[in-house]
Image: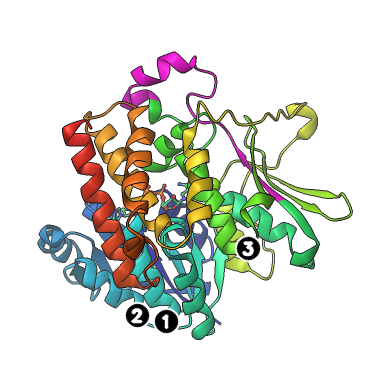
Amino acid sequence: MTRRISIFGATGSIGESTIDLIHRDPEAYEVVALTGGHNVARLAQQARALGAEVAVTAHEENLEELRARLAGTGIEAAAGEAAIEEAARRPADWVMSAIVGAAGLPPGLAALEQGATLALANKESLVTAGPLVLATARKHGARLLPVDSEHSAVFQGLVGEEIDAVERIIITASGGAFRDWPLEKLAEATLEQASSHPNWDMGQRITIDSASMFNKALELIETREFFGVDPEKIEVLVHPQSLVHALVGFNDGALMAHVGPADMRHAIGYALHWPARRHVPVDRLDLAQIGRLEFRAPDERRWPALRLAREVMAEGGLSGAVFNAAKETALDGFIAGRINFVRMSEVVEEVLTRLSADHGLIHAEITLDNVRAADDMARMTARNIIETGA
Ligand code: NAD
Ligand code: MG
């Protein structure tokens, strides 16, 4: 039986890896929607190769070009945020959520409302609106599967286990580009240096977030939301080789580690074939050749993002939406050369301090509208801090 699938963020790093797996077994899938951003040529190519029903670019100004590139194929072309949501409302069995940033939330919710299985690479959905995402899945009988490598690893470690027997969840972090840099040099880190990851080949934004540890900060919150465990039970462990992705500690003292190559096709393949396991074309590890695995505690002076994530988990409500939006804006500022690498976490901390005083904003009901309001306010505040330097 063919499965109807859609891929949101098809032209990105996770999207491309997903398509790589789909291409290996084309008869098994019927592709409904593919979405992308400015890379219209690639999106059109993917849509033709997979025979998609509709291709959507996020940007209205790209619509004409997309239409031209799909002329004569019978594939629909569309553009803009509303068109992405419309595409997410088309019935599908399995949907990959791989847009980067808060923009991934609305189509993810729309897919859950159709009862689709949502493979969630877009961690921002759980950081900004975890309770809403989970409630939407429950209400519509939809399933949520993790794609982030650490969360897929934890998920696999929990198969057949009782959550009450879990004492702790440990997610690993490579430490990113600046793991071993002297602290006083971090302010001088260039965009190019921050955009190169020692182990993983990923989109630019998550690569920089790995160097600043904002990626792991988001993942702490993602772990809390996905598995419903107390923040005190979640730990971050620096592991430079990125081969152990996560460990689950049980009340009998056992630690179950998930070990695998740093290739996202493993986690994507697990979510694609779940609950079965199927062959996935990733390298097999030769542990004798690797010889040793290293672990160390994270240094919170180097990575203040981890401390901020703990504060966000303690505050709850919409502080995750504020945190994420402030982070996205600070990252934009770093990419544009307006602020230095160290300033990113200072900006985020300042936004959190200012907006957590606004109880009405932070502790409003978690609805899509309120998430958007908190997100807007955080971006405005962050831009203001970046511009005025105060
Ligand atoms: P990427 O930058 O390579 O791709 C992002 C995709 O989203 C592209 O298709 C782009 O066109 C689209 N996009 C960007 N902004 C958009 C917007 N405003 N509206 C609609 N579409 C938009 O990113 P990626 O590395 O593939 O990451 C995607 C998501 O997966 C992120 O949430 C990231 O944190 C998560 N993730 C990625 C990896 C990885 O290995 N790359 C690992 C774990 C989790
Ligand atoms: Mg991850």
**Does residue 256 appear left or right of residue 130 in this picture?**
right
Pair 3/1: label in front: 3
Q: Are marks 1 and 2 in contact (CB under 8 Å)?
A: yes
| Residue situated in front as seen by the camera: 134 or 51 | 134
Q: Secondary structure at mark 3?
A: helix
Per the rendered image, the range of residues in magenta is: 169-193
Pair 1/2: label in front: 1
- The residue shown at (42%, 55%) is 320
Q: Amino acid at mark 2?
A: Arg
| Residue situated in front as seen by the camera: 99 or 276 | 99
Q: Split into 4 quadrants, where in the image is the C terminus?
A: top left
- The residue shown at (48%, 82%) is 115
- The residue shown at (24%, 57%) is 376
Earlier residue among tags 3 and 2: 2
Q: Judge whether 384 appears above or below 292 on screen.
A: below
Q: CA distance from mark 1 to mark 2?
A: 8 Å
How is colour applied across the structure in the image? Answer: rainbow
Give the residue pinned by disc 3. 227
Q: Give the percent coordinates (x, y) of residue 277.
A: 69, 64
| Residue situated in front as seen by the camera: 132 or 34 | 132
Q: CA distance from mark 3 to mark 1?
A: 21 Å
Earlier residue among tags 1 and 2: 2
**Does residue 290 appear left or right of residue 381 in this picture?**
right
**Disc 2 CB within 8 Å of nearest ligand 1 atom:** no
Give the residue pinned by disc 2. 89
Image-quadrant location for residue 371: bottom left
Find residue 113 and name its label.
1
**Does residue 188 appear left or right of residue 135 in this picture?**
left
